[in-house]
Image: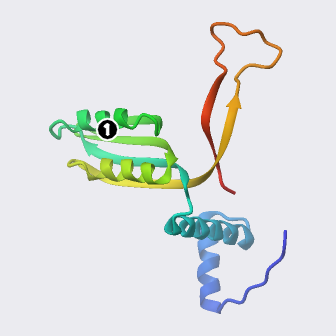
Amino acid sequence: MERVSISLDDGLLEEFDSFIRRKGYENRSEAIRDLLRQRLEADREEKGDAEYAIGCLSYVYNHHQRELARRLTETQHSHHDLMLSTLHVHLDHENCLEVVLLRGATPAVRQFSEQTIAETGVRHGYLHLVATEMEHGRHSHRSSDEHHHADDHGHSHHVHLKPKT
C-alpha cells in the first residue's frame, strides 16, 4: 500500500472530518478509500466499462393499482435470467415494498429496473449497481470423492459474477 499526501483548505477538512464522524469511519484513510471507490465505480458506469453488474432494485408500490402486481410479476418472469431473489413486504393497507436482487449484463439490469420503476403505481424506485467481473467455467456443489447421486446438483454455469475490487 502506498502513502499519499493531499492538501485541503481548512473549511473542506472540517466538513470532511464531520462527515467521517457521522458515518462512523475510524480514520480519514478509510473514508477516502471508500469515496474513491464510489467515484471510480460511477466513472466506469458512465463510460460504459461496467459490462456486468449485480443490482439491488427497491421500490414501493400501491398494490391496489389496477393489474400492477400482475404486471410486475410478469415482468420478473420474463426476465428470470436476471433474477436472483425477490423480497416482498407489506408496509400498510395499500403499499408494498419489493427488493429485487439482479445479476447480468449491466444494460439488461438497468433496462429491467427502469421498466419496473416506470410502471404506473410504482413509487420511490432506486437501483444500486455493483460492477462485476465474469468468470467462466464449471463448479460442483459436491466434493470430488463423493459418488454422483440423484440429489447431487453438480452443474455448469455459463457466468459467475464477482464484485470488482
User: Which quarter of the rendering shows the C terminus?
Assistant: bottom right
Residue drawn at x 46%, y 36% as measured from the top left: 81
Residue on which disc 1 sits: 75
Residue drawn at x 51%, y 45% as measured from the top left: 104
Side (left or right) of 42 relative to 110? right
Of 22 and 137, nearer the camera is 137
Q: Secondary structure at mark 1?
A: helix
Of 117 and 95, nearer the camera is 117
Examine the rendered structure and indicate whether residue 80 appears above or below residue 46: above
Side (left or right) of 92 relative to 155? left
**Residue 89 visible, this orientation:** no
Side (left or right) of 91 relative to 3? left
**Residue 150 visible, this orientation:** yes
Examine the rendered structure and indicate whether residue 139 appears above or below residue 115: above
Residue drawn at x 67%, y 20% as measured from the top left: 154
Count of numbered badges drawn on the protein: 1
| Residue 152: percent from left, percent from top | 66, 13
| Residue 100: percent from left, percent from top | 43, 41
Examine the rendered structure and indicate whether residue 160 appears above or below residue 11: above
**Dot 1: few (<14), some (14–19), or many (≥20) neighbours within 10 Å?**
some
By what rule are the colours in the image chosen?
rainbow
Of 49 and 53, nearer the camera is 49
Q: Residue furthest bottom?
A: 9
Q: Residue furthest left?
A: 66
User: Which quarter of the rendering shows the N terminus?
Assistant: bottom right
| Residue 140: percent from left, percent from top | 71, 24
Identity of the amino acid at label 1? Thr
Side (left or right) of 3 relative to 45? right
| Residue 74: percent from left, percent from top | 29, 33
